[in-house]
Amino acid sequence: MVVKTTPVMDRLRVDTRELHTAAENHPLQKAQVAGTLPKEDYVATLGQFYLIHRTLERYLRNHSTNRAIATVVRDFQFQELYLVEDLDHFGLDPQTIKPFPATKRLIARIDALANDPVGLLAMHYVLEGSNNGSKYIAIAVRHSYGLHDGRGMKYLDPYGDLQRDRWAEFKRDMSAVEFTEDQIDHMVDVARELFTALPEIFDDISATPD
């Protein structure tokens, strides 16, 4: 008897839904959408995500010949350089950024996945998927901080009008990989870890004196 594997994107979406919603409803995220987040907190958020993307993307590149990574991950999905551009716009040297406690814990978890391409891909799924919501946050940020030339907000809207196409391509490529049920279970677990970490990172940013 053949056991049918639930499509990976369905599992990831359904089994992380409540944690995804909790992260989206964090006060910091709501403040961004409302246009009331202090600029210092916005820049601090960019800084912490720079550290996260720098770490994750280094490991993804190390596994560029892995079948799943090679099928799904594209160079244009890497966001580290966009974050460097955004931070430079605000006069912040990325090399001076220190991780907050929750960021440090997440980076340690990514380090632990260094030789686990499937786990790394689950982390990448969460961050790549966040571009869908970030595109709407970008609208509020543009007006809040006067970023009408687009500088300082490349990370929030990396694909512009291509966002929908990029996400459709990502979903198609993920679905093309023949993950085992155990691998999908593992991806769900890792994705849930990242979704759990995000509100903790937002808490640290909100608690840091300007």
Image (cartoon, rainbow, N blue to C red):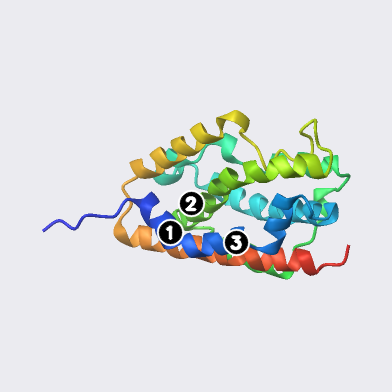
Q: Which amino acid type is shown beneath numbered disc 2?
A: Leu
What is the quadrant of residue 147 in the picture? Answer: top right
Q: Which amino acid type is shown beneath numbered disc 3?
A: Ala
In the rendered image, which quarter contains the C terminus? bottom right
Residue 173, visible in the rendered structure: yes
**Which of pointers 3 and 2 indicates the residue nearer the eye?**
3
**Disc nearer the start of the sequence (1/3):** 3
**Disc nearer the start of the sequence (1/2):** 2
Crowd rating for badge 2 (residues with CA inside 10 Å; few <14, some 14–19, many 20+): many
> Do tag 1 and tag 2 residues touch (Cβ < 8 Å)?
yes
Q: Secondary structure at mark 2?
A: helix
In the picture of the structure, the residue carrying the numbered disc 3 is 23
**Disc nearer the start of the sequence (3/2):** 3
In the picture of the structure, the residue carrying the numbered disc 2 is 121
In the picture of the structure, the residue carrying the numbered disc 1 is 187
**Which of pointers 1 and 3 indicates the residue nearer the eye?**
3
Crowd rating for badge 3 (residues with CA inside 10 Å; few <14, some 14–19, many 20+): many
* Residue 46: percent from left, percent from top: 74, 51
Q: Residue at x 86, y 48 (%)?
A: 92
Q: Residue at x 73, y 52 (%)?
A: 34
Residue 155, visible in the rendered structure: no
Q: Real-space Cα distance between discs 3 and 2?
A: 20 Å
> Do tag 1 and tag 3 residues touch (Cβ < 8 Å)?
no
> Do tag 3 and tag 2 residues touch (Cβ < 8 Å)?
no
What is the quadrant of residue 2 in the picture? Answer: bottom left
